[in-house]
Every structure is written in structure tokens, then in C-alpha cells.
Amino acid sequence: MAGIDDTIKAKATGPIPDGYAACGGDLSVGGKSLPSLIETEGDTPLFVYSRAMLTARMAALRAAMPPRLAIHYAMKANPYPPLLAFMRPLVDGFDVASGGEVELALAAGVDPSRISFAGPGKRDRELAVAITRGVTINLESEGEADRVLAIAAQANVIPRLAVRVNPRFDLKGSGMKMGGGARQFGVDADRVPALVQRIIKSGADWRGFHIYAGSQALSADAIIAMQAETIALTAQLAEAIGAAPRHVNLGGGFGIPYFSGDVSIDIIAVGKALQAEFDALPPIIAQSEFCIELGRYLVGEAGVYLTRILDRKVSHGETFLVTDGGLHHMLAASGNFGTVIRRNYPVTIASRFGAEPQEVVNIVGCLCTPLDLLSHAAYLPAADVGDIVAIFCAGAYGASASPAQFLGQGSAQEILV
């Protein structure tokens, strides 16, 4: 048991998302108890995704956003095939970032007309599949436009093309800035009109704009300002081109609370402000269709990573819980996925869910590297070998964004419940 001195040394952990419950002292996900979840898959480590939480998140978002706004799923957040199939009827479109994701979306039954393909380094063979299947390609450069038009001409297909715009602004407070200044993403705004005019002249099916300024923001004011700037830029570009875009992807940027002190974004405020923008659209884009593109906001909090404690040891007065998982499955929780200052994800002892914290521990994985630290100095219920650790906010950028094959460890299992 830890004394008061250990408690003072503890580092805060992030907030456990709403939607998780206790069942007989264990964590329950989607109405299934911890033992039954592990028994179903046979072992840990294990990612568990909740259908109920996915459905609830989409329902709340639909209620908050303007009715005319389409919602797209950015599947790079989580491409687990059963999850894709579950999300298909819940969203209006899928945004992909590779030929592999195109194939995954098609395999999940997504109509090609609902898929848009972005990314700064598309191979010719990926472009050819997208063109022939009728996927919309978000062009990232003039050179990519040349390649697409040549491939389409050779295949005798009219390509569906949008232009990704690199705006002059970014999303304030975002975890990753995707616009403003020199970027590998998109075409600088001042060069967009000439490119679009060339696309239209070529006979291609010009679909509109993709404008993505940043991701993982928790400030409603920052999102509201970014969307207003995006709509204004859309109108300016349309006027310069002399034609209205059929579709406008306003990007995303909606973040989720990972760390202590983080507060969920006020989507009601965002929706009201966006409705006001729609009510006052400039005439040239008044009939354009608008969407937002969200990944982690839709699926991040609906996933939890479960890993079993293999060993409990003390070193220089600190307690280490060594698990059968690690950064090879949950790279982001280790602080090695773009985090400048390492902070603790939401974490608990799943097999003692709801128990009072009693000790300060370091949770580490099984890899031979000091980087494999899943939680540092966390104040948690007392745990021993055989107990299960749960790391939350694992539904996005978890399994598919981590080096599963590092040190020959292999992938974690995944389940949708």
C-alpha cells in the first residue's frame, strides 16, 4: 500500500470517458464483463470497441450539427474492418489516405461514390484503382493532377477530382497543424484557381475543395473561427475560378480529452455557429454541399486497450507493473506519437474497476526499451500479477498506428462489442 508521500508524487491521469461501467468489480464494455471479453478472444492484449458508444457519439453529433452538414469518417483513425462495416450506415462518407484504405472501405461495402482519397504521396497504381472505381481524389499538387489526368485518359475514364487547399490559416491550439505556411499537404490557396480551371477544361468531374487546417483541438472558439475562415476562403476561390464547388470538405479538428485538465469540445456551440455561417453563405456557394471529416472524435473514446500484468517489481523504491502489452500496440499512450510533453492517458486497473486508488505505480510493457512506458507514477488501485490494466481513448490511432511487429511481438487482438 502506498503512503501519503507516494500519493503526493503521483502524476495525474486523463479522464475516463463516459460509457464504461463496472460489473462485479470488473470493467464492463458494451454490456460484456471483463472476463467474458478476454475469454471470447482467448488472451490479452486486446482492443475492445463499443458499438453503443459509437452510436451515441454519432447521435449527439447529428443533433448538434446543422441538418445540411454531412459527416465523414476519416478511417485512418481506425480501419478495423468490423468497425468500418458498423460505421458505414452511421456516416455519410469515408475519407481515406492510401490505396490500402480504399480497398478496406470497398471491402466494408462502402459505395465508391462516398469515398474521397487524400494524401501527399499517392502511387500511380493507387490512383488507377481510385479512378476506375469512381472514388473522388483530393489532389495534393499540380504534379499529381498531371498524373491523374494522364492515367484517366489512358483508361478512358472521367475522373472525379477535388483539390486539397493549403490555406493561409491554421487551426489554433490544434495538436497537429495541417495548414498555414509551407506544407506537404494540398495546393497553396493562391495557386488553386488556375489548377481548378485546368481541371474543368480537361473535362474531368470537378467535385470541389478539401480544406483541412488542423486536428485534435478542444476549443470550440478555435473550431468556429477555423470553419468561418474556411467558408470565406471557399467563396473567394469560387469567385476567382468563376464556378461553384459541388462539395466542400471543411476538415475536422474535433479533439477528445486525453489528459488531466482536458475538457470535451462544446459541439453545441460549434453547431450553432456553423448554422449561422450557413444562413449567411455568399451566393456563389449557397448551393454547395458541406461536410466535416472526423476520425478520433467519432471512435477514440469508444475503444479501450486491455493488457495483463505479468510481473510486479520494485526498483529504487518505485513499483513497476510489467504487462504483456506495450507501445507496439499503444504507441500514443507511451508519448511517442507526436506528443511534445509526455502525459498519462486515462488508465485504471480493469479487474478492480471502481476500487479506490492505493498506490503509485509505473505501468510498462514487455519491450526491451525504456520508451515502453504506458503510464508514469499513476495513482491506482492496488494490483498484482494477473490483474488487467485498461488504457482508455484507445479507439483511434491505437492498433493500426503502432509498430506491432517491433521485437517480434505481433499484433493485439481486436473486438467490436
Image (tube, rainbow, N blue to C red):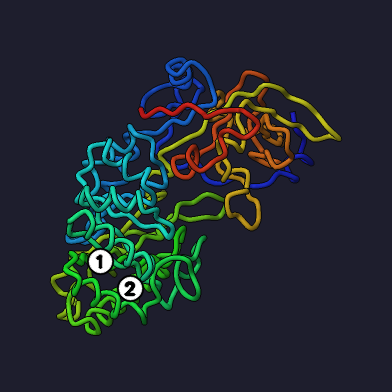
The crowd level at tag 1 (other Cα within 10 Å; few <14, some 14-19, many 20+) is many
First in residue order: circle 2 vs circle 1: 2
Where disc 2 sits, the SS reads helix
Amino acid identity at mark 2: Thr
- Estimate the x, y position of residue 394 in percent, counting from the top left: 48, 40
Q: Identify the element where label 1 is drawn.
A: strand
Q: Nearer the viewer, residue 230 or 128?
A: 128
Give the quadrant of residue 13: top right
**Pointer 2 with pointer 1, Cβ within 8 A:** yes
Q: Identify the residue at horizontal 25%, vertical 56% (top origin).
A: 136
In the depicted structure, whether residue 112 falls above or below residue 165: above
Give the quarter of the image for residue 313: top right
- In x, y percent, where is residue 226? 38, 71
Q: Amino acid at mark 1?
A: Val
In the rendered image, the residue lying farthest to the bottom is 240
Mark 2 closeness class: few <14, some 14–19, many ≥20 residues within 10 Å: many
Residue highlighted by disc 2: 230
Residue 265 drawn above or below residue 180: above
> Would you say residue 351 is visible in this rendering?
yes
Q: Which residue is mark 1?
A: 248
